Amino acid sequence: MRRKEQDRLARMDADYQRRKEMAEFTMRREERMKAAEERTVKSVWKGEGKRRRRRNQMVVEEHRKEESSDDEANSDDGN
């Protein structure tokens, strides 16, 4: 009977350790997943900013080209 009880307690301890390790693993995994998601969101946000600035720069350059071509056309008409 004593041996059975010792075996039962050993199994309970092993089961407790296994559940504890699994819970720790799950918690660490969730933290890593959350950090990875935050990095992804940040990089997407930065990429969007770069694309937005590039688009704005292209619009400004097109506007300048239109103004310069309009100025040239107006100066040619005046001569």
Image (cartoon, helix red, strand yellow):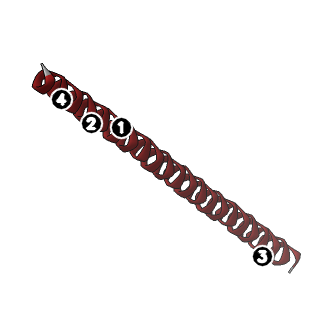
Viewer-nearest of labels 3 and 4? 4
Callout 1 amino acid: Lys
Q: Secondary structure at mark 2?
A: helix
Question: Which residue is painted at 78% across and 76% down in the image?
Answer: 72
Q: Whole-percent x and y of residue 63?
A: 74, 64
Viewer-nearest of labels 4 and 2? 4
Crowd tier of the residue under label 2, counting other residues whose Cα lies within 10 Å: few below 14, some 14–19, many 20 or above = few
Q: Are marks 1 and 2 in contact (CB under 8 Å)?
A: yes
Mark before the other along the chain sequence, 3 or 1: 1
Q: Secondary structure at mark 3?
A: helix
Q: Is residue 74 left or right of residue 37?
A: right
Q: Are marks 3 and 4 in contact (CB under 8 Å)?
A: no
Residue at which label 1 appears: 20
Callout 3 amino acid: Glu
Rendered image quadrant of residue 11: top left
- Between 4 and 18, the residue placed more toward the observer is 4
Residue at which label 2 appears: 18
Residue farthest along the top direction in this orientation: 1
Question: Which residue is painted at 23% across and 35% down in the image?
Answer: 14
> How far separated are the C-alphas under marks 3 and 4?
98 Å
Q: Secondary structure at mark 4?
A: helix
Mark before the other along the chain sequence, 4 or 2: 4
Q: Which mark is residue 6?
A: 4
Callout 2 amino acid: Arg
Query: Quick check: 75 above or below 60?
Result: below
> How far separated are the C-alphas under marks 4 and 2?
18 Å
Q: Which mark is residue 72?
A: 3
Q: Whole-percent x and y of residue 13?
A: 27, 34
Mark before the other along the chain sequence, 2 or 3: 2
- Between 43 and 5, the residue placed more toward the observer is 5
